[in-house]
Image (tube, helix red, strand yellow):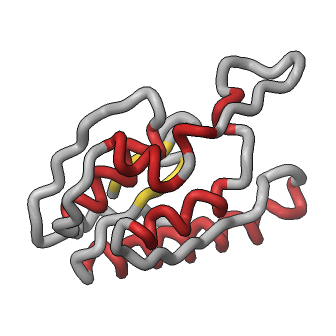
């Protein structure tokens, strides 16, 4: 399998402002690039992320990320943007490896199409288990 090295860029300036909650930072970045007037407080509040806290016994400090991410999407809609979600399976067994790799290829292709169309994407796992704007 060969790697693609072609770069595709959205046709607008995208300024990423880091945040403790990487989903809020990536979502705010994408919304601002699409000319939605918002800041991290708007995104965290309107989506309800600011009110999520689920820390189970024995869970690492990532407890505030243990919830249904889809529950945040209506808040993005209230901020004025539609969303699409593409989720791939979990890489758990060798027999699933090729199937999961194909899902990753499909997710990458979808993100490339969106970026080429001028719609930046929020992606999980672009680096470490955190969200990124692409």
The quadrant where residue 51 appears: top right
Query: What residue is rendered at 37% in x and 31% in y?
Result: 19
Query: What residue is rendered at 74% in x and 19% in y?
Result: 60
* Residue 125 vs residue 38, the one in the foreground: 38
Direction from residue 23 to residue 134 in the image, left or right: left
Residue 83: where, in percent of width, then height? 47, 75
Residue 67: where, in percent of width, then height? 73, 46
The quadrant where residue 73 appears: bottom right
Residue 46: where, in percent of width, then height? 46, 54
* Residue 35 vs residue 100, the one in the foreground: 35
Q: The C terminus lies in which quarter of the figure?
A: bottom left
Q: Is residue 51 among what the camera can see?
A: yes
Query: What residue is rendered at 85% in x and 25% in y?
Result: 56
Residue 43: where, in percent of width, then height? 40, 50
Direction from residue 125 to residue 18 in the image, left or right: left
Direction from residue 104 to residue 18 in the image, left or right: left
* Residue 11 vs residue 32, the one in the foreground: 32
């Amino acid at each position: 399998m060969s790697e693609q090295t072609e770069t595709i860029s959205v046709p607008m300036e995208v300024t990423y402002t880091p945040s403790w909650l990487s989903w809020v930072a990536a979502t705010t970045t994408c919304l601002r690039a699409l000319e939605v007037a918002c800041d991290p407080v708007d995104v965290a509040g309107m989506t309800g992320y600011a009110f999520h806290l689920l820390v189970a016994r024995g869970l690492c400090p990532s407890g505030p990320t243990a919830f249904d991410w889809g529950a945040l999407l209506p808040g993005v809609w209230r901020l004025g943007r539609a969303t699409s979600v593409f989720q791939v399976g979990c890489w758990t067994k060798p027999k699933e490896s090729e199937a999961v790799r194909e899902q990753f290829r499909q997710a990458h292709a979808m993100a490339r199409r969106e970026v080429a169309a001028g719609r930046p994407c929020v992606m999980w796992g672009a680096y470490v288990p955190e969200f990124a704007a692409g």
